[in-house]
Image: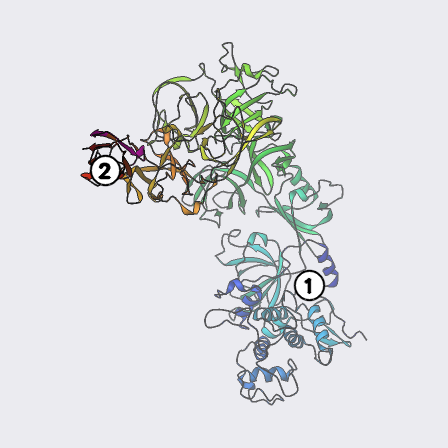
Amino acid sequence: MDFLKFHPRFSGNRDSGENLKKVLALVLAFACAFTMFAGAAFTDQADIKATDAVDTLVALGVVEGFEDGSFQPNATVTRAQMAKMIYVLRTGKSDASAYNDDKTSFTDIGSHWARGYIKYCQSLGIIAGKSNTIFAPNANVTAQEAAKMLLVTLGYNAEKAGLTGAGWAAKTNALADENGLLDDVNTSFTSACPRQYAAQLIYNAINAATVVWRDDAYTNMALTGTDYLPTVGEKYMGLIRTSVTVYGDKARNDSLKDGELEVVLNKKTSEAGDADEHKIVTYSVSDITSKIGQSVELLWKESKDTKNNLDKNDKIYGMYNTRDTSVVEATVADIDDDFTDANKVKINGTKYEFASGAELYTNLDSGVTADKASVEALIKTAPKKTGDKIRVLLNDSNKITAVYLTTSDLYKVTAVSGKKVSIAGIGTVDTSENNSTVYDGVKKDDVVVVTKLYKSAVADATFVIEKAVSVTGKLTGYTGTKSVKVDGTSYPQYAKAAFKTNLTDDSVSALQSGDVDDEVTVYLVNGYARAIQKNSDDMNQYAVVTDVNDGKLDSNFSEPKAELLFADGSKKTVVLHKDSVLYADANSNHNGAAKLATGVDISTALAKGELVKYAERSNGQYKIEEIAHADSHYQTYTGDFYKKDTKALMGTVTAGDCPLFYTNASGEYKVSNVRSLNDITLSSKQVDYIVKDGKVVAAFANMTARPNGAAGDTKYGIITTDGTTTTKDGDPYTMYTIWTGEETVVYVDGDQNGLAKGKLVSFDPSADQTYTQDSNGTKDFTILDGSAIGKGVKIAVTDYSESDKTITFANGLKVEGNAYVEISKTTKALDDDAQIVYIDADNNKAGDSGVGITEFDGTTGYANALIVYDGNNASNKIVAVIVNTNSDVDVMGQKNVAATKYSVAAPSVTGTTTGITATADKTTALEGETVTVTVKLDATATATKVTVSGTNATVTPAGATTVAAGNTYTFTVVVGASAPAITVTAA
């Protein structure tokens, strides 16, 4: 006996086995049910995963939230609560008190609040106890136990269906799965069931067909064998399921109101009306454009005012997919262009035949007959192969009943006023009308993707205006009009046709071979390249030529090379790309109108000091173009060259990153951000500058001096290693490591003039880490030995304010007691970008930056810092401070007091001088410092009294001292505020 003969279902919706196989073979959209109650506004709504189930059951009154506004989706359900929900499901009522006094075998529910619900369910065999006498109402119900209860609700007899005894769990699992009760129940089947998944089980049961015992088996089919038995919702809750086709909302039918939906009945029913009859219902559907044309089932209840007629007064609880219609989602490009089979079309490799009466809708406007000819025209004319979306509806016979095409294209915004957006080629769209939408922040000149729906007239159509997706990067290749590749990623070209133009100033209709490696911006429509903008000035970085060879463009044998100084201060020798643009003329001033031909020495057109723009190509070469090619090399200028307060260079505002290339006093090329500089005034100096978009973006000045404020890129530090002979790129160098706040390795050629471990230095960084230091030539390093203001100033710091960016130091030192103290102090301001480098001058290494800039050590009097002034002018701000954190030596690694000492001359002896000598123990001393004077009388001395006195000095003992021949006497002299003069008077 076929005891459990059953007709399978799919995703909680009734279907035949044949249709199920078809559904599994197709790519379907919207396979899951959706409801109108998308948001019961629970405080913990974000935690609810089974939103459709919870929202529908709340609307039906089967479940409810808590008084605090929460639903507590992950709280568990008790057996008593489950009994109540099933009671409401079966009866549509919430009060079961009429059953409170019914007899029961359960002894643990005597006065329990749910006893009526439990007794009702027990009487129908829906629930069973833990034993014959124990129900355990407050125990958690498992998903498996809940499923068993719902299976009995569907019509199964627990004993006959095998839902009792040792095998009840396995049988419950099988039947629950076959009936679709387990769809979207994402929880353990044997653990306590969370509230949201209890709701999901009941939700699935509402949509499940009931079953009856017939011919020795359970079945969910009616006697006819073609229709299903009523669902639980239909049988017990008075819900009606009606098959309809979605027509649209008020955007498609002007007579509709907000929240109303127009549908078409798929067949005649006694409850709803006649087949093909249009009905207006009260129902809101999100993303309505994706639902139009889809065959669905409405779950609804009749209102009391109108019977046997579906209308907007009826309560609709949900909308569900049927298997009468399947949906194939694709794009126009997925339609094969092989139209050899009559009345068929191939989509993604699968052929579909057109049903009689099929229609093709473009942008949800009025339809035309959908057949092979119309679809073939679709892809052989506009829009051809694109990413435009199509939705193909298939009937029960797998034939096409409708094709919905949604086309989009690029446009340019020409004006925005409130909710009105003007678009070139369309007109002005009032986005507050017709459910039109536009993204936040839309503005003039935006490139946008526009989709126009429902109506042809602009005033009546619904517009979806989205900002165009764009990709900016290096053009790495393209294939005719088929595809374009940016930064290695390929994008198919829209319709395999020319790019759309006039969207931006630099948009082009086609690419050329010379565009490869240039920067471009591609604008996409549904992933297809519809327009392309050549960022023609992709060479938007600037440099100055500091050296050049006699190579030739496009020559491997004689590679053209130039040394460039970049805006960041680094230098690099580069190979020039064959497409570099150099100019020459008969005057050999390297700036004529004629472009240098291939095969000619680049040195005939490119000279030191040329201002160029450049872009690095994928092969590592540099494409450059001279941008200073006037009749004269550079103009001669006298006057205010740059004004800091207005940020203007020769009257034109500078860009924030504008580099100023200049020559220093040694004729070397240097660079600084012009915005970091102070006012610059020139007298008969050669200058040039480049203006782009109304701002100066690069400039040059042959200043032969460093501009005030231009020290920002210079590095300062201590050499921490001995020089090591090595090679770099095959050339010999001496390598040093310099602590500049970080370990910096440099490679130096020349005779290394002044460089040695422990030396303080400053230098401008080089991109390739190579430098020259030669006694008779270039000196890339300045030795900071404090010997002149240009070589730093040693100071004894008395105070530092990080907040005020000031440092205070002693003008001179004197001795008080046993300590060195300042005579007076000076406070100087630090530049906002001043570099502070901490060193250990005794051990020639990095210092402890954690201690900060501290006061000098009064026990030694050593200078603990070295400062560098901007422009080597003490009237300017300090641009660098090198701080020694080791007080055993001064900042130079020496043990010298940070002050100028006075000369102490040998004492003079006057009066009875026979046999008397006088000496001082110091030849120099500070104010307050003690000098010991020793007076010695030999055997010939006749003096009996000695007086030691001094100018700018205090002597102890003061006055005459009695002396005798053959003895030695000492006196203490404290030095005053200038050099002392010590006199010994004998009498």
Question: Residue 638, position in %: x, y?
Answer: 34, 19
Q: Name the residue at the right extreme.
A: 1
- Closer to us: 911 or 310: 911
Is residue 900 at all visible to an observer of this figure?
Answer: no
Left or right of residue 74, residue 873 in this image: left
| Count of numbered badges drawn on the protein | 2
Question: Residue 599, position in %: x, y?
Answer: 62, 15
Q: Nearer the viewer, mark 1 or mark 2?
A: 2
Left or right of residue 60, residue 854 in this image: left
Q: Which amino acid type is marked by label 2? A: Ala
Q: Quadrant of the N terminus?
A: bottom right
- Closer to us: 974 or 24: 974
- Closer to us: 403 or 105: 105
Q: Is residue 974 above or below residue 233?
A: above
Give the extent of the magenta segment.
Answer: 909-926
Residue at screen point 42% across, 23% down: 664
Q: Quadrant of the C terminus?
A: top left
Residue 327 within the magenta-colored segment of the rendering: no
Left or right of residue 706, residue 185 in this image: right
Label 2's element? loop
Crowding at mark 1 (Cα within 10 Å: few <14, some 14-19, many 20+): many
Which residue carries the number 1 mark? Answer: 10
- Closer to us: 876 or 441: 876
Which residue carries the number 2 mark? Answer: 964
User: Which disc number belongs to residue 221?
Assistant: none
The first of marks 1 and 2 along the sequence is: 1
Residue 867, by quadrant, is top left
Q: Is residue 575 above or below residue 885?
A: above
Label 1, label 2: how far apart the Cα atoms are = 131 Å
Q: Which amino acid type is marked by label 1? A: Phe
Question: Residue 778, position in %: x, y?
Answer: 48, 22
Residue 212, by quadrant, is bottom right
